[in-house]
Amino acid sequence: MTELAKKINVSPNTVSRWERGKRLPNLDAIIALAKFFKVSTDYLCGLED
């Protein structure tokens, strides 16, 4: 979690909130997550398999 947070420039607490369903990532974070995991934003949003 800490490595991910550093790579996408958010706090570890933010990642934890996403994981626990307490918050949703904003568009910039979704794009950064897609790049980090090498998937599309549509995949992250559940719009494609």
Image (tube, helix red, strand yellow):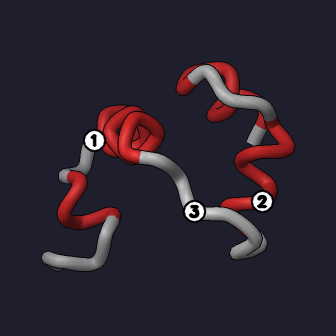
Q: Quadrant of residue 13?
A: top right
Residue at point 76% right, 71% down? 22
Question: What is the quadrant of the C terminus in the image?
Answer: bottom left
Q: Earlier in the sequence, mark 3 or mark 1?
A: 3
| Mark 2 secondary-structure assignment | helix
Q: Is residue 17 left or right of residue 9?
A: right
Say what amino acid the circle numbered 1 marks.
Answer: Lys
Say what amino acid the circle numbered 3 marks.
Answer: Leu
Q: Position of residue 39 (x, y in %)?
A: 24, 50
Specify few, some or many for label 1: CA neighbours under 10 Å numbering under 14, 14-19, or 20 or more: few
| Mark 1 secondary-structure assignment | loop
Q: Are marks 2 and 1 in contact (CB under 8 Å)?
A: no
| Of residues 26 and 6, the one drawn nearer to the viewer in this rendering | 26
Q: Is residue 11 above or below residue 14?
A: above
Q: Position of residue 8 (x, y in %)?
A: 54, 26
Q: Is residue 14 left or right of residue 31?
A: right
Tag shown at residue 24? 3
Tag shown at residue 17? 2
Tag shown at residue 38? 1
Q: Is residue 22 above or below residue 15?
A: below
